[in-house]
Amino acid sequence: MYEVTIETGAAKGLRKLPKETLQRIAQELRSLSQDARPPGCRKIVGSENAYRIRVGDYRIVYRVDERLNRVAVQAIGHRKDVYRW
């Protein structure tokens, strides 16, 4: 079981999402508490513990801390903008 935290930048990204997309992303965030590396997640190149999940044209970028059993969501947004954090 993982604790999922949403950082400030990701929370701002959530507020900007269309309602339908928000529901799909909320479902993915809930599933991260069970499995920090679900099928379909990709490791971000050049980072030791950062991953991304694709939800349509949107991405959830997060880091996993195995020592604390924590998933820290760093960015949520459209694929063209999300990697600029």
Image (tube, rainbow, N blue to C red):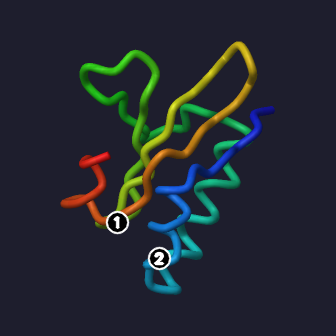
Q: Residue furthest right?
A: 1
Give above or below for 5 relative to 21. above
Q: Which mark is residue 6?
A: none
- Residue 68: quadrant of the picture: top right
Could you tell me the amino acid type at mark 1?
Gly
Disc 1 versus disc 2: distance between alpha carbons?
Answer: 8 Å
- Residue 11: quadrant of the picture: bottom right
Q: Nearer the viewer, residue 85 or 20?
A: 85
Residue 76 appears left or right of 47: right
Residue 19 appears left or right of 33: left
Q: Position of residue 5 (x, y in %)?
A: 68, 46
Q: Quickly name the residue at label 2.
A: 21
Mark 2 is surrounded, within 10 Å at the Cα level, by few (under 14), some (14 to 19) or many (20 or more) other residues, namely some
Give above or below for 40 relative to 49. below
User: Callout 2: helix, strand or loop?
Assistant: helix
Q: Position of residue 2 (x, y in %)?
A: 75, 34
Q: Earlier in the sequence, mark 1 or mark 2?
A: 2
Q: Position of residue 69 (x, y in %)?
A: 74, 24
Could you tell me the amino acid type at mark 2?
Thr
Give above or below for 73 relative to 46. below
Look at the numbered discs 1 and 2 and tell me whether their residues touch, using CB distance below 8 Å: yes
Q: Quickly name the residue at label 1.
A: 56
